[in-house]
């Protein structure tokens, strides 16, 4: 019996060392094989997984220091022309009251955020046909005029190349457009027929060509996601090299076709955050609201897994619960000054400080170089 027990311990130790060696290889090569990915996702919670997170923290700190960058999130509109199967503000959700913010309200949100120390604003919304360029460009121009030292990020879905160019010329710096999945068949399962994987990728290329800092990302645990689709997502990170990359767990949401699907795993999300950090060391990587919505300490865990961005909500308090992209969405305190102090205390408790800067993407130095360069989808 004792001999069998010793053999079991030795095998466990061997497995742990093998997994830690995999982590070191991923960091060294900035690549991951399908076999390594499967092993690291299947590994039991323990020393090897902590080594994965620790290595990701080191890489993030080497690139940006031991800080968390803040972005003030303004949810512009809960109207959306699309009917994505996972999203609570999908077109067919007739039970959801809708709203739109006007220009004065958006600027008031920015002023409150600026006074509390925020230097990046994120204007996010559904694909609302109301917000034509004629209505949207004046808002961006005023934001740029009144906050010249701030970064302006937009997350307003698929638009024409001409619209993206006009928004860039008006003063927007960054654009977030989640690719959702790098597998075309998986993309088709998550979206209605009028949305295409090819067009989403074309929009991302347009944004890059125009000069935006570009953000992409995917949900962890979305229906029919598997190791193969995740592997494609990680290779997309390596090839497209987005400046920002958002990963959050899928959250099943009422009044959607996926309402009864299981939520994505917080644990798997944390492991993928670490892997993305190792594959793309200088990426700006949020500890997402969805992570904090499923786990009260999810954002702290995200930072400790290699993330370095948090996006406090500075939308009007009366509208936050109407931007119901998923159930149980974390909204934070109404007063951004109170919320910022709360975040400061929480992140100081794990050894991090809040940055007062815009938190721009930093180009990697020569120590970070790819050994291979996959084709861009």
Image (spheres, helix red, strand yellow):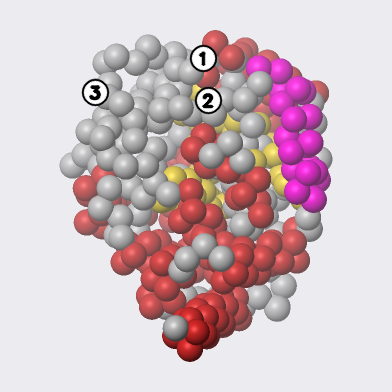
The quarter of the picture where residue 356 lies is: top right
The percent position of residue 155, horizontal first and vertical second, equals: 50, 37
* Mark 3 to mark 1 CA distance (whole Å): 20 Å
Which of the numbered marks, if any, corresponds to residue 75? 2
Callout 2 touching callout 3 (CB < 8 Å): no
The quarter of the picture where residue 130 lies is: top left
Q: Residues within 10 Å of mark 1 (few under 14, many from 20)?
A: some
Residue located 34% across and 35% down the image = 252
Look at the image and tell me whether residue 34 can be seen: yes
Q: Residues within 10 Å of mark 3 (few under 14, many from 20)?
A: some
Callout 3 touching callout 1 (CB < 8 Å): no
Which of the numbered marks, if any, corresponds to residue 319? 1
Callout 2 touching callout 1 (CB < 8 Å): yes
The percent position of residue 66, horizontal first and vertical second, equals: 78, 55
User: Is 176 included in the stretch rendered in magenta?
Assistant: no
Against 203, residue 339 (above or below) is above
Against 125, residue 71 (above or below) is below
Circle 3 sits on which residue? 92
SS assignment at label 3:
loop
Q: Give the range drawn in magenta.
A: 334-354
The quarter of the picture where residue 27 lies is: bottom right
Q: Is residue 238 left or right of residue 361?
A: left
Residue located 76% across and 22% down the image = 338
Q: Quadrant of the N terminus?
A: bottom left
Q: Which of marks 2 and 1 is nearer the N terminus?
A: 2
Residue located 70% across and 78% down the image = 367
Residue located 44% across and 45% down the image = 249
């Amino acid at each position: 019996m004792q001999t069998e027990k010793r053999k079991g311990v030795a095998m466990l130790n061997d497995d742990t060392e093998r997994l830690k060696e995999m982590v070191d290889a991923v960091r060294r090569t900035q690549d991951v094989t399908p076999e390594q990915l499967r092993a690291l996702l299947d590994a039991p919670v323990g020393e090897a997984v902590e080594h994965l997170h620790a290595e990701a923290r080191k890489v993030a700190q080497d690139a940006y220091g031991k800080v968390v960058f803040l972005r003030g999130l303004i949810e512009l509109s809960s109207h959306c022309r699309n009917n994505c199967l996972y999203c609570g503000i999908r077109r067919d959700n007739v039970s959801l009251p809708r709203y739109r913010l006007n220009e004065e309200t958006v600027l008031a949100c920015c002023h409150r955020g600026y006074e509390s120390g925020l230097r990046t604003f994120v204007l996010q919304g559904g694909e609302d046909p109301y917000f034509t360029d004629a209505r949207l460009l004046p808002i961006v121009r005023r934001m740029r005029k009144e906050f010249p030292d701030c970064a302006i990020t937009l997350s307003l879905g698929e638009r024409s190349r001409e619209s993206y160019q006009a928004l860039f010329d008006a003063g927007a710096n960054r654009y977030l457009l989640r690719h959702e999945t790098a597998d075309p068949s998986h993309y088709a399962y998550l979206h209605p027929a009028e949305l295409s994987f090819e067009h989403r990728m074309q929009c991302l290329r347009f944004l890059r060509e125009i000069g935006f800092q570009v953000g992409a990302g995917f949900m962890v645990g979305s229906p029919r996601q598997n190791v193969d689709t995740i592997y494609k997502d990680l290779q997309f990170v390596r090839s497209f090299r987005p400046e920002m990359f958002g990963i959050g767990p899928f959250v099943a949401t009422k009044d959607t076709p996926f309402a009864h699907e299981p939520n994505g795993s917080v644990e798997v999300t944390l492991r993928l955050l670490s892997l993305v950090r190792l594959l793309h060391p200088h990426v700006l990587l949020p500890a997402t609201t969805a992570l904090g919505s499923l786990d009260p300490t999810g954002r702290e865990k995200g930072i400790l897994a290699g993330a370095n961005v948090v996006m406090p909500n500075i939308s009007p308090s009366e509208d936050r619960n109407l931007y119901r992209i998923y159930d149980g969405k974390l909204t934070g305190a109404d007063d951004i000054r109170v919320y910022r102090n709360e975040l400061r205390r929480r992140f100081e408790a794990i050894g991090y400080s809040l940055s007062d800067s815009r938190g721009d993407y930093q180009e990697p130095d020569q120590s970070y170089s790819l050994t291979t360069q996959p084709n861009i989808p």
